[in-house]
């Protein structure tokens, strides 16, 4: 396999894609729930896509609450999205997956809380090996773009919502956070040119790379 080492980081985009995927795949179960999400940006965007579902910030625990614990534990149940480096021994959950647009150096995962005890180091090794090669050459494309495409097409087919409308919502919600604190862009590099790896820190260069990634995403989405 030809490896294409890639580190495209846009944490908020990856998280909102996983939230949408989980909700649409469990729509019937979640329709009667109160979805708890702390971040207002995610709640606003999800309300636009799923107007019949109730989203709110946590106030107190209720039986009908369903928790998306995003980068902090509100209540240790339902879904957790967190950095894998926060786990040194075990991950108590199932369906452990990578979140798209994660940082290779600080991978973020999503899982469903359960009594299953999984070795954290096993998943660190598994995802590290995937990131080292397959992420940049997944069915001849970048895995993150592939995952976004699959999620958006599924939303369109299941709910009849045009995927370009969703892309615009995501862009409009998170573009204003275009700085290294929220959008850490890195040049896409080939394994033959590792020495040219460059972190993007200034706002003007970060904007250029953000626009390049958005253009690439749009090109891939237009094929569907």
Image: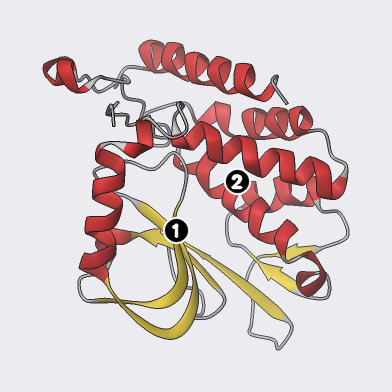
Q: Secondary structure at mark 2?
A: helix
Residue that badge 2 annotates:
17
Q: Earlier in the sequence, mark 2 or mark 1?
A: 2
User: Residue 46: percent from the left, percent from the top?
Assistant: 73, 50
2 or 1: mark nearer the eye: 1
User: Residue 135: percent from the left, percent from the top?
Assistant: 37, 37
- Display coloring: secondary structure
Which residue is rendered at x = 71% and y = 65% of the image? 56
Residue that badge 1 annotates:
97
The quarter of the picture where residue 118 lies is bottom left
Which residue is rendered at x = 57% and y = 15% of the image? 215
User: Residue 220: percent from the left, percent from the top?
Assistant: 61, 22
**Quarter of the image that includes the C terminus:** top right
The quarter of the picture where residue 65 lies is bottom right
100 left or right of 42 in image: left
The quarter of the picture where residue 97 lies is bottom left
| Looking at the image, residue 112 lies above or below residue 153 | below
Q: Secondary structure at mark 1?
A: strand
| Looking at the image, residue 63 lies above or below residue 147 | below
User: Residue 149: percent from the left, percent from the top?
Assistant: 62, 35
138 left or right of 106 in image: right
| Tally of numbered discs | 2
* Of the pair 21 and 9, the residue shown nearer to us: 21
**Quarter of the image that includes the N terminus:** top left
């Amino acid at each position: 396999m030809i490896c294409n080492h890639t580190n495209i980081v846009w944490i908020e985009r990856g998280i909102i894609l996983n939230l949408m995927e989980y909700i649409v795949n469990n729509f019937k179960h979640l329709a009667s729930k109160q979805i708890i999400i702390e971040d207002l940006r995610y709640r606003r965007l999800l309300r636009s896509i799923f107007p019949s579902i109730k989203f709110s910030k946590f106030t107190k625990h209720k039986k009908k609450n369903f928790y998306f614990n995003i980068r902090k534990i509100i209540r240790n149940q339902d879904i957790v999205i967190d950095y894998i480096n926060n786990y040194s021994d075990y991950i108590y959950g199932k369906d452990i997956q990578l979140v798209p647009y994660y940082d290779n150096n600080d991978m973020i995962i999503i899982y469903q809380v359960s009594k299953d005890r999984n070795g954290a180091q096993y998943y660190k090794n598994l995802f590290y090996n995937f990131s080292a090669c397959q992420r940049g050459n997944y069915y001849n494309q970048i895995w993150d773009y592939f995952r976004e495409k699959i999620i958006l097409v599924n939303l369109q087919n299941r709910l009849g919502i045009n995927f370009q409308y969703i892309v615009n919502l995501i862009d409009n919600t998170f573009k204003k956070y275009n700085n290294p604190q929220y959008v850490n862009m890195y040049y896409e590099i080939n394994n033959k040119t590792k020495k040219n790896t460059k972190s993007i820190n200034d706002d003007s260069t970060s904007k250029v790379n953000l626009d390049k990634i958005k253009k690439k995403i749009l090109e891939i989405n237009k094929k569907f």
